[in-house]
Image (cartoon, helix red, strand yellow):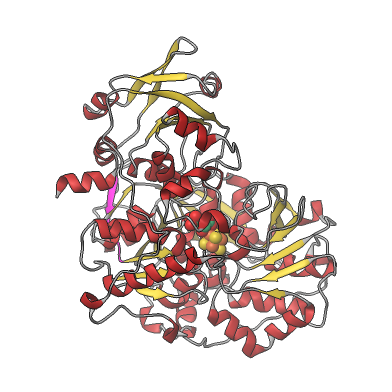
Amino acid sequence: MPGKNLFEKILYRHGIKLPLKQAETLELPVDQTLTQDATGTLACLQFEALGVSCVRTRQSVSYVDHNTFQAGPQNGDDHRFLRSMAAKYGMIFSPPGNGICHQLHLERFGVPGETLLGSDSHTSTAGGIGMLAIGVGGLDVAMAMAGEPFHLRCPEVVLVRLEGTLSAWVTAKDIVLELLRRLSVKGGVGRVFEYGGPGVATLSVPERATIANMGAETGATSSIFPSDERTLEFLRAQGREGDFVPLSADPDASYADVIRIHLDELEPLIARPHMPDRVCPVREIAGLRLDQVAIGSCTNSSYKDLATVAAILKGKRVHPDTNVVISPGSRQVLRMLAETGGLIDMIEAGARILECSCGPCIGIGQSPPTDGVSLRTFNRNFRGRSGTLSARLYLCSPEVAAVSAIKGKLTDPRSSGKPPAVAVPRAFPPMEHLFLQPSGHPETVEIVRGPNIKALPTGRPLPDTLEGEVLISLGDDVTTDDILPAGPRIMALRSNIPAISEYVFSQRDPEFGKRAREKGGGFIVSGRNYGQGSSREHAALASMFLGIKAVLALSFARIHRSNLINFGILPMILSTSEEREGIRPGDELVIEGVATSIKIGKTSVRVGNRTRKKSFEVSIDLDDRERKIVLAGGLLNLVRLRS
Ligand code: MIC
Ligand code: SF4
């Protein structure tokens, strides 16, 4: 047998038999879970429904970092509910203000070689420390918390070989933007990216984490870095040397493909509106006037990132026409900036310092003005994500952002002399005391539910005939932000499916929810990569609540596909774009014998279009477990049937 790659090594450590078979569904034991408040309330309600008395993972952490705006009682109610759930069921609780889950997880809990499942698409950030870290929907995390393995269709493993070293002003962000430029937002679907080559040793753990974070934008299942001297250096600085485990691929490991990136050849890059893969060199669009520069997010808010920003801003003033907002990734980062004086440099330069949370990345405050241009160190620039539908969002490194903030226009930093030399401290304050440990007397803990926390809706077993209208027809790369937008108003309803379902497709088609209710549900038709982006299972659950029976698309993004199945919505695969274009909104579709076909393992069914008087085949690509889930009308129903 050939040597093992990193992915195989981690699977092997978890008792999975090698060699892996293509299209096999792996049952992956989960060591750690991560939830954040915006997806965590549902995950907790689902965990409760499973009837388990305590989490059965080695470690589960519940973070509050998204809905920290607290305009009205809903956010606070969710926080209180989550705190009581964590205390009762054995999770560590990270209260609002501690920081962004992915940054905190790296600092405090990430362990090389372990598996992490998180109800946030950027859970893959922990791949920077050598974890196999996968973003999924909340129900999959709830199942893992209840001790179930995670079912993963075996991805192909691609080696991303980094050669050489980065030039001045070129950063880890540019490496992952280059990957996006080459592969697009669909190029990682069904793949794990494993990093190797001599360039890896030149990158620190936070830099690796930036790359692993934004690997999610390619649709990849995960991104993994080896665990080496640099990993040890990071863990040592965090006072967690004992968690170090060396991990590297065997020299003769095999890969489905190899992508080579020559670091010396890279230059500062930028993603243009409205997709993270619309990448070009900064120099090509330099001069663009900026209304806002937003620095932070789980992609680029480590101490090194922000200390570099502070060093660039030191003694300067941000341009008066440009609003500059900075959200540090964690309290540790903020405290270090305070200690080393970087915070003073930011304040004196005129930057607005925000709370350590997701904030503007998800439109929770700081929305740009009408038609505004916002330059961000974040990972997503989908239309409307900032809270301003007409805004244009650009994604770049902290270096580009800081230099541009001073000029008030997009600037290639290579025109600004030498980059500042920023020292990273050898030791960081652990801030351990700011995490709440579970109660020693869980039986005494009462779960506190505010009025906004509503019961979970349940699905119905799949009928043998599906019929209804096509409610909407969409193109490629529809995001879960399109399906269910973010922002403080809608996100405050994450624990209230009846209320949030009003907003399904609200930015694309404000009448969608009303129409779906009037018609008693129906079908969604779409192009390639339907449901890319966020892991929010609300996009599937609220669709189910509105009576969506199936989505007919050319292809699906991994997490949303699983979420659809988990809530009993059939993902059906169309074969050609012409076929998709031939189905119009308002068309009456009928699929007969669908449950029978799925029961007997058929991989395609015939869809009749009554309006156009024609019919066509769609594929149903489900494994055995997924068939059972859709037949039962969702995973929770299946679990109930079994117990
Ligand atoms: C995002 O970046 O889109 C989010 C908000 O973090 C989501 C999770 C959510 O919608 O709550 C994600 O990435 O999964
Ligand atoms: Fe938060 Fe933005 Fe990261 Fe999502 S991408 S976890 S909203 S910082």
* Residue 584: image location, x then y, percent: 54, 21
* Residue 493: image location, x then y, percent: 48, 55
Q: Is residue 377 above or below residue 513?
A: below
Give the residue furthest to the bottom. Answer: 339
* Residue 255: image location, x then y, percent: 42, 49
87 vs 561, left or right, is: left
Q: Closer to the camera, 510 or 323?
A: 510
Give the residue furthest to the top. Answer: 613
Q: Closer to the camera, 328 or 613?
A: 613
Q: Closer to the camera, 307 or 55?
A: 55
558 vs 580, left or right, is: left
* Residue 117: image location, x then y, percent: 37, 60
Which residues are drawn in magenta? 25-31
413 vs 87, left or right, is: right
Assess whether residue 28 is covered by the magenta stretch. Answer: yes
Q: Is residue 198 above or below residue 600?
A: below
406 vs 220, left or right, is: right
Assess whether residue 564 is covered by the magenta stretch. Answer: no
Image quarter of residue 446 = bottom left
Is residue 510 visible in the rendered image? The answer is: yes
Is residue 9 visible in the rendered image? The answer is: no
The residue at the point 52 percent across, 88 percent down is 427
Q: Is residue 14 above or below residue 1?
A: below
Q: Closer to the camera, 210 or 360?
A: 360
Image quarter of residue 425 = bottom right
The residue at the point 14 percent across, 50 percent down is 643
